[in-house]
Amino acid sequence: MDFGFAAADDEFRAAARAWLAAHAGGQGQADRRGWERTLGSAGWIGLGWAEGGYGNRTATLTQQVAWAEEYARSGAPPRSGHIGENLLAPTLLAHGSAGQKRRFLPAIAAGEELWCQGYSEPGAGSDLAGVRTRAERTADGDYRVTGQKIWTSLAHEADWCFVLARSDPQSTRHHGLIFLLVPMDQPGRIEVRPIRQMTGTSEFNEVFFDGAHARAEHVVGGAGDGWRVAMGLLGFERGVSTLAQQIGFAEELGRVVRTAVETGAADDPVLRARIVELWAELRAMRWNALRTLGGSGGPGAPSVAKLLWAGWHQRLGELAVEVRGAAAGVGPADWSPTAPYELDEAQHLFLFSRADTIYGGSDQIQRTIIAERVLGLPRERKGVV
């Protein structure tokens, strides 16, 4: 397959690289919300939305890839606006009303409003059709949301949450669901509790909705249409951003290789073979991601991509601590059961990657999707232990 970049793409890439070199410094690390506004004011959020008047600048798909790759290489901070820009915005462009697009897309493109994703619940994580959060219609036609979400990334920073809830109390599974846009600033109605992770950080949260208010005009796709909208969003989750993720993976692999050389672990021919295998698999993931851009990979493409990178990243984490030797087993001097603590790169990579095969849809769920929707195998019986 020949996925090439034209001269215009190379010029776009050079401009992106120069801007990042000039701006991706300490400001972004110190003030992530301020960094989002800087990106927005310079026109780097919402690439490709300009045709509808919602984004900042016109960019082809290949130019969006170039920007994502250069951002990953630049050392710029992790994006707080990723969920709004790369998940909600494409969903609104595909399923939202004209009013919803006018209200929310410009604010995302300006870096002014941050979003979180209200999908997983206790007892309904990878099995998303089991959600129990309720959306009850009020006398004035709006909705009252009650329930709990979990593993909600960046909920402690978000202004809004898109919530999958059950609007028909008599419904089961993927029927009777609704996709709601809910403001987070509702004291007494929404509570966010950070979840402390093995790494000592708390990017994930529990979110409790106690009669939270959502306006009727903020229902995307209509009541009962939540499953279709939610599944459409998951397809956007593994698009251009996957290629940027792979740039980060390549840098992590490079650090593991350098450590292996420094510690002498690279003298082991078996370990060297594992490094080469990881390198080859990463290249294959890149070509698979390029092949499936624009939805050309078929209904199982997102699940295949998730299976590929999740297992790969876990194996890299295992190799990272192995090449460090005994030093990888030494805990941080500032360890505390309640306060943040510092891990070295190998330790953080190993511990954080343990969750890769669970979040975003577990490996078991991805294999079930491929079996049933792609291979046409008999559907799994529900409720069988």
Image (spheres, rainbow, N blue to C red):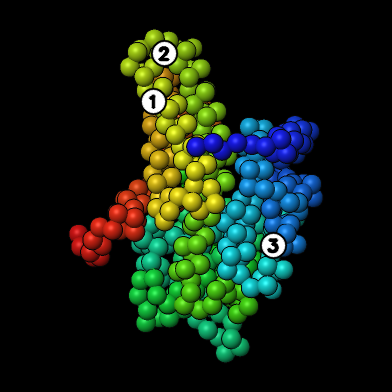
Disc 3 or 2, which lies upstream in sequence?
3
**Front residue of this view, candidates 223 and 55:** 55
For label 2, count other residues whose C-alpha is less than 10 Å away and answer few (under 14), some (14-19) or many (20+): some
Q: What's the mark number on residue 65?
A: none
* Image position of 183 (left or right of 102): left
Q: Position of residue 38 (x, y in %)?
A: 77, 46
Is residue 189 visible in the rendered image? The answer is no
Q: Residue 105 — which label?
A: 3
* Quarter of the figure with the C terminus: bottom left
Image coordinates of residue 61 in percent, x first then y, are: 63, 47
Q: Are marks 3 and 1 in contact (CB under 8 Å)?
A: no
- Residue for point 56% across, 38% down: 3
The mark lying in front, picked from 2 and 1, is 1
* Circle 3: residue type: Leu
Separation (CA) of disc 3 from disc 1 = 42 Å
Give the mark nearest the N terminus, 3 or 1.
Answer: 3
Q: From the viewer's perspective, is residue 91 above or below residue 281?
A: below
Which of the two discs, 3 and 1, sits closer to the camera? 1
> How far from the left and from the top, in percent, is residue 100?
66, 71
Can you identify the residue that label 2 sits on?
Answer: 266
Give the quarter of the image for residue 78: top right
Q: Secondary structure at mark 2?
A: helix
- Give the residue number, with chain letter if any, for mark 1: 277
Q: Residue at x 53, y 84 (%)?
A: 137
Is mark 3 in CB contact (under 8 Å) with mark 2?
no
* Residue in the foreground of this view, choosing between 12 and 353: 12
Q: Quadrant of residue 323?
A: top left
Q: Residues within 10 Å of mark 3 (few under 14, many from 20)?
A: many
Q: Amino acid at mark 1?
A: Glu
Q: Nearer the viewer, residue 374 or 112?
A: 374
